[in-house]
Amino acid sequence: MINIFLADDHAMVRQGIRTLIEREEDMQVTAEGGSGEETLSKLPVVKPDLLLLDIHLPDISGLEVLE
């Protein structure tokens, strides 16, 4: 199973992506973040296999989160 973390400041975008991912048998969304700070605080705990990251987050750029 591929565990995915969704990071986007738009809840509707996260929900749409979640819906698409959950149609796949070998993927699941294990966590979501609506800001850079929230994403950074959850990542060490969740430890996903894949991070889908919006680079235009309101508080910390997604590029900074990626570093």
Image (cartoon, rainbow, N blue to C red):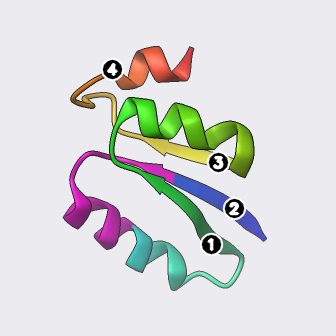
Question: Is 15 contained in the magenta span?
Answer: yes
As drawn, the label of residue 3 is 2
Graded by Cα atoms within 10 Å as few (under 14), some (14 to 19) or many (20 or more), the crowding at tag 4 reads some
Mark sitting earlier along the chain (2/3): 2
Query: Is tag 4's residue or tag 1's residue first in the polypeptide sequence?
Result: 1
Q: Give me the C-alpha separation between circle 1 and circle 2.
A: 5 Å
* Boundaries of the magenta span: 6-17
Label 3 CA crowd tier, 10 Å (few <14, some 14–19, many 20+):
few
User: Label 4: which residue?
Assistant: 61
Mark 3 vs 4, N-terminal side: 3
Residue identifier under label 1: 28
Between the C-alphas of marks 1 and 3, the distance is: 10 Å
- Label 3 SS: strand
**Which label was assigned to residue 50?**
3
> Could you tell me how far apart the alpha carbons at marks 4 and 2 are, in whole angstroms?
23 Å
| Front: mark 3 or 4 | 4
Q: Is residue 34 above or below residue 36?
A: below
Answer with mark 1 or mark 2, whichever residue precedes in sequence: 2
Q: Residue at x 70, y 51 (%)?
A: 46
